[in-house]
Image (spheres, rainbow, N blue to C red):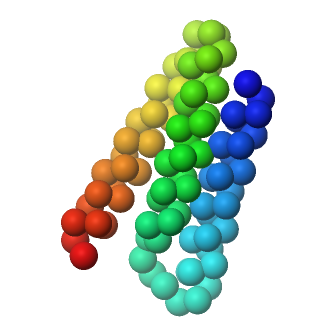
Amino acid sequence: MMDLMFSGLVLIALAWLLQLYFTFRGSKEIQKGFIILYILGVVLLVTNDFKSGNPYIIKVGWFELGTCLASLLVLVKIWLSR
């Protein structure tokens, strides 16, 4: 299970590095790639949380799932506005 958590955190870190790269290049927009990598990373974290069986960790997973859904809404909004 640690592999899922590690992989999820790596994807989230890569997402932030991608966003940072475009920000330093002068972009003020949220990059679609950032959101996609972030969502994939959070999905791995949520999967890890629910597989743990620990009630406290499962509660954390529900909050993470909420951030995943919010990110998905932002991604849909960006795609529909272009």
Q: Position of residue 9 (x, y in %)?
A: 69, 46
Q: Position of residue 26 (x, y in %)?
A: 53, 89
Is 51 located above or below residue 36 in the figure?
above
**Residue 51: which quarter of the image?**
top right
Q: Position of residue 14 (x, y in %)?
A: 67, 61
Q: Looking at the figure, which quarter contains the N terminus?
A: top right
Furthest-bottom residue in this view: 26
**Residue 16: which quarter of the image?**
bottom right
Say left or right for 4 vs 15.
Answer: right
Say left or right for 65 vs 56.
Answer: left
**Residue 81: which quarter of the image?**
bottom left
Q: Could you tell me which residue is drawn at 61 percent across and 70 percent down?
A: 18
Q: Could you tell me which residue is drawn at 42 percent across and 77 percent down?
A: 29
Q: Looking at the figure, which quarter contains the C terminus?
A: bottom left
Q: Could you tell me which residue is drawn at 64 percent across and 11 percent down?
A: 54
Q: What is the count of numbered marks?
A: 0
Say left or right for 16 vs 64.
Answer: right
Query: Closer to the camera, 77 or 28?
Result: 77
Is 49 located above or below residue 56 in the figure?
below
Q: Could you tell me which residue is drawn at 66 percent across and 68 percent down?
A: 17
